[in-house]
Amino acid sequence: MNKHVSPRLNRRAFVIGTATLGAGLAIGLDLPFGPTVVRAADGSPEIGAWVVVRPDDTVVIRIARSEMGQGSLTGLAQLVAEELECDWTKVTTEYPTPGQSVARKRVWGDFSTGGSRGIRSSQDYVRKGGATARVMLIQAAADGWKVPASECTAANSVITHTPSGKTTTYGKVAEAAAKLTPPADVKLKDPKDWQLIGKGVKRLDTVDKTTGAMIYGADVKLPGMLNAAIKDCPVFGGKLKSLDEAKIAGMKGVKKVVKIGDTAVAVVADTWWHAKTALEALPIVWDEGDNAKVSSESIAKWLAEGLDDKQPAYVGNKNGDAKAAIAGAAKKVEAVYSYPYQNHATMEPMNATALYTADKCEVWCGTQNGEAAFAAVLEASGLPPEKCDVHKVMLGGGFGRRGQTDYVRQAVLIAKEMPGTPVKLLWSREEDMAHGRYHPITQCKMTGAFDANNNLVALHYRLSGQSILFSLRPEALQNGMDPAAFQGVAQSGEAAFGYSVPNLLVEHAMRNPHVPPGFWRGVNVNHNAIYMECFMDELAQAAGQDPLEFRRKLMGNHPKHLAVLNAVAEKIGWTTPAPQGIYRGIAQVMGYGSYVAGAAEISVTDGSKIKVHRIVASTDPGYVVNPAQVERQVAGSFVYGLSALFYGGCTVKDGKIEQTNFDTYNSMRINEMPKVETVMVPSGGFWGGVGEPTIGVAAPAVLNAYFAATGKRIRSVPLRDQNITFA
């Protein structure tokens, strides 16, 4: 057993332990170099953990984060390649496994991919990995020429000895470079000298995706593989009461019925369709418990009670005395908004393939967190870390859902019942929809107060609803408070409030229904942005002021928030009249370390049919690695955000989620998609996220435009419930 690996590792201890490791460590560089060359699977030498160089000058860049369509794979490769000074046309990538990483003291760092952290949380150490490899390759060439390394330069995978003009390639010196001791410290390029970072290079995964060569979890095939379908109690918290296996014993292809703890049942068969057909025919009796009495109406009532000031709440942002200022104000404005459960609805349902023996357990799956999946394998298999591993394949959608590991655990437990035989577990669409980890359900009561001169003097923002951290990471709560609940309205940090109000109170009455919440692309920014930015428009109307100018007056102390707001206002042409029949709305928020704003142009027919003609987004993520990918991510985020606004929303009846397929949980179509224009205003000096922040401004921009067009305020979504549709 590797001396760096403990013999047993509890899943909880592993997850908490890995979460505490800081990204600032020089991970990726702490390897046993020297006479022993560490080699990749094909025998090519590693030049540090992040870079493998083949004799033909192909550069393999290791990617620890997950690619799920957001472009992190290409962006991270750009970061490494920038410092490596390699030939970009010869770059390819591969995923290290979490088992390999643990065995090498977590040399690749954090595998988690969520919260728009894929690039911003690892940019420093992956760039150092590229720079270190470059220094070692140059040193190896210099040693061969017997000249000082200071006389050599590298560009496009070619090393040149400047005085003599001698050249060699990375592939020719890679073997020698791999034997060198890496430098203790390397200097990274100044951003002004970047040549690859900031370029809209083509994605590295496009060809395989468009030709069908890309392997997703649902595509995995292993020799002798069986297939499993699963059904969990339709009410969260319910249990399995009984089943009658004899009823399906003779059905075609059926191999085994497996109970998963006391909550789920799986059928293993030769094909998935045979497994699913048998599962549907299997008589199962559930003990649904008290949660079967819960409905959307009962949840809404409970959350509404949390809006009462007399109920306890956690304070997330405060200055002055908002309640006193409101009590003595010349004018008061009040509104209550709500946001529903939302499903991730990934195109590829949850799945994992597991192969278990007494000496080894391996899993092949799409996951947003390879280390969490690895921990789930350890727990379910009962085997030590050196006997387990997870092979990450492409995700057919993640959006936060594949950060959870329930499907991985289930696959291993099923495989344990079939030792030596690989089993692919694939959830049905109905199972996937009914057993998600949903965007938290919330309500919000907001009160604003003005003095006699229509100056905003107080704002009380009271949120009532679920805490994701309470459910998924209780150790991250701060004296019981969920700091993530205040995304976009926080006092400071990566999702800070962008307005200055003399008296402010932002609080959260935590109420956790039985339906489990999860990180859903954009997470708490989504509802907080709707609540705050739509209410800002309500306040502007009450003050008789233009929505843009009203915001600007409150943003003097928030220059980066103001800069993106101004950029989007200029691009949409806010100060010029809109075309006949076109109405505009605007919004801004900060999320995931980035400042974003959005402005929409819409028209409305018959008061209920909306045509979104155009959305402009402005973003300041500090630095832009690949502007082409940023544009795609902004457009993609608007697909997600507008789908949620118009069609999303999960309801609960008899304790169960009612929407179990795309006929009742729709997504916008291409003909409904507006023109998207992206304005990037990177101010430098920090690294913000891209994939999630702009989701937050899509809905409030459209809702504010709808008010401008109709004079009607929409304070709850989805719009389908208001009988409002796309035109």
Image: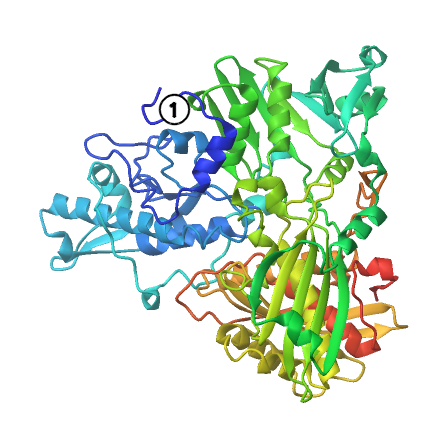
Residue position marked by numbered label 1 in the rendering: 6
Going by the image, does 646 lie left or right of 623? right
Percent across and percent down for residue 516 are 69, 41
Q: How is the image coloured?
A: rainbow
> If the image is split into quadrants, where does the C terminus sit?
bottom right
Observer-nearest of 26 and 467:
467
Q: In which quarter of the image is residue 47?
A: top left
Question: Which residue shows up at 65% across the image and 55% down it?
Answer: 313
> If the image is split into quadrants, where does the N terminus sit?
top left
Observer-nearest of 66 and 203:
66
Percent across and percent down for residue 594 are 51, 64
Image height of 20 relative to 458, above or below:
above
Percent across and percent down for residue 572 are 64, 79
Q: Residues within 10 Å of mark 1 (few under 14, many from 20)?
A: few
Q: Is residue 581 visible?
A: yes
Residue kind at label 1, given as amino acid type: Ser
Q: Residue furthest left?
A: 146
Observer-nearest of 297 and 325:
325
Image height of 670 relative to 146, above or below:
below
Q: Is residue 269 visible?
A: no
Q: How many labels does the image show?
A: 1
Q: In which quarter of the image is residue 355?
A: top right
Question: Which residue shows up at 48% across the image and 62% down it?
Answer: 200
Going by the image, does 116 lie left or right of 174? right
Label 1, secondary structure: give it.
loop
Question: Which residue shows up at 75% across the image and 75% down it?
Answer: 333
Percent across and percent down for residue 705 are 75, 74
Question: Which residue shows up at 75% across the image and 28% down it?
Answer: 232
Observer-nearest of 36 and 267:
267
